[in-house]
Image: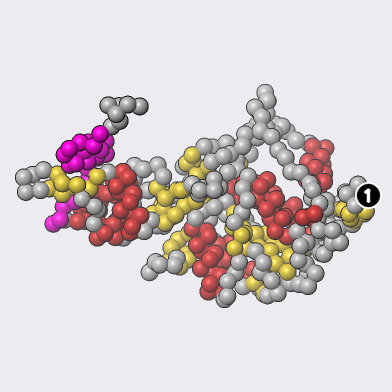
Amino acid sequence: MTDDEIPQMPEDAAEFVDGALNNKPELIVHSGDLPATAYALRDLFAKAVHLFDRDMPVKLVQPANGGAMEAKPLTVSSVVVEAHRLCQPVKIGIDEKYIPITLPDRVARMYLDLIGEWNLPPLVGISSAPIIAADGTIRDIVGYDAASELWCSNVPLLCVPTRAGHEDASAALRLLRDAFKTFPFADAVRRYDPVLGNQIVDLDYPPGRDESGFLSGLLTAVCRASLWLAPGCLIVAPQVSGAGSGKGLLVRAICVIAFGIRPRAFTAGHDRQELDKRIVAELVEAAPALFLDNVNATVLSSATLASVLTERPARVRLLGYSRMVALNSSAFIAVTGNGLTVSEDLARRFVYCELERNVRTPKRVRFRLGFSTKSRPAGGSC
């Protein structure tokens, strides 16, 4: 590129700025009527495809690591930033010309206080799983689905038979059990496999209570986006010998199968109040899964967790807000721990799976989970 081809800054900097701003609409900031400006900003934000209502304005963002989309609550500063992405705030000068300015924080606060008037589409959650309709058909949606109020992305195209018989179901069950046969389900009948050099679940026997609990948790996760409410999945192991039994690996495998993501694990914190804050903060982001890990040697009790599992919406207190927030959640909730029990109010809200210590832990045993997406065959249902 020659010197003549390099874009040069105009001598008049104001002329350069005006040219850059011409592509965005102007938002007139009326110093004598800031509420009118807040409503004008509200109408502008309502047209944006990445802003939603979770009883608070939120913005869909893509994490830098390429993981699942997240919903981030708007703050005063982020409202200002979003306003300048979508428009150019201006004030009217003495000569009746528009002068570019930064959106005042007072206008941003007024916008956030327009509770129930944001005119943004409601967001229940973010899903990367197909949605099962009421008539049993499978809908592969991309983007916002107004019927379910879910944001859908990276949804695989599934090919399933129009009708499935008993033999199909039995084969599918055996396929799932075979993939997880190295895990030490506490009450499973096991045998020694000389090829793997380890004890495995004997698939000639029906699944026991603990393996059935895991399979129920897996199917719950796959269908979670299509269910109004669903139980959580509790995976526990003995307090002393349960380390390395594969609890976290099971949860991650569930999320890879159901959502195509690795869930972000978080811990309970130092007390019950801190746990509730962390649960609410995670659920607000509308991720497909919530993974509470390493809740060891304790009795888990959380009114917030109990409410979220059985109420929709659940009213919660969000850190930094002076009001209760009505939170709709479609997240699959999984909890793991050694020597973990749950309080009476949570016991009926979880499916239960217990692992026991194995000589050779599942982390040292290689196994492969795979699936493929294909075109829909004639006569199939997707």
Is residue 7 or residue 26 the one in the foreground? 7
Outermost residue toward the left in this view:
95
Residue 222 appears in the figure: no
Residue drawn where x is 58% and y is 71% of the image: 269
Q: Is residue 96 magenta?
A: no
Magenta residue span: 8-32
Quadrant in the rendering for residue 250: bottom right
Rendered-image quadrant of the C terminus: top right
Residue 338 point in image, percent of width and height: 73, 69
The total of numbered circles placed on residues is 1
**Looking at the image, residue 44 lies above or below residue 157:** below
Q: Secondary structure at mark 1?
A: loop
Depth check, front residue: 364 or 79: 364
- Residue labelled with disc 1: 194
Amino acid at the residue labelled 1:
Pro
Seen at 89% across and 55% down, the residue is 199
Q: Is residue 25 magenta?
A: yes
Q: Is residue 50 left or right of residue 283?
A: left
User: Considering depth in this image, is 8 or 380 the residue closer to the camera?
Assistant: 8
Image: 97 above or below 105: above
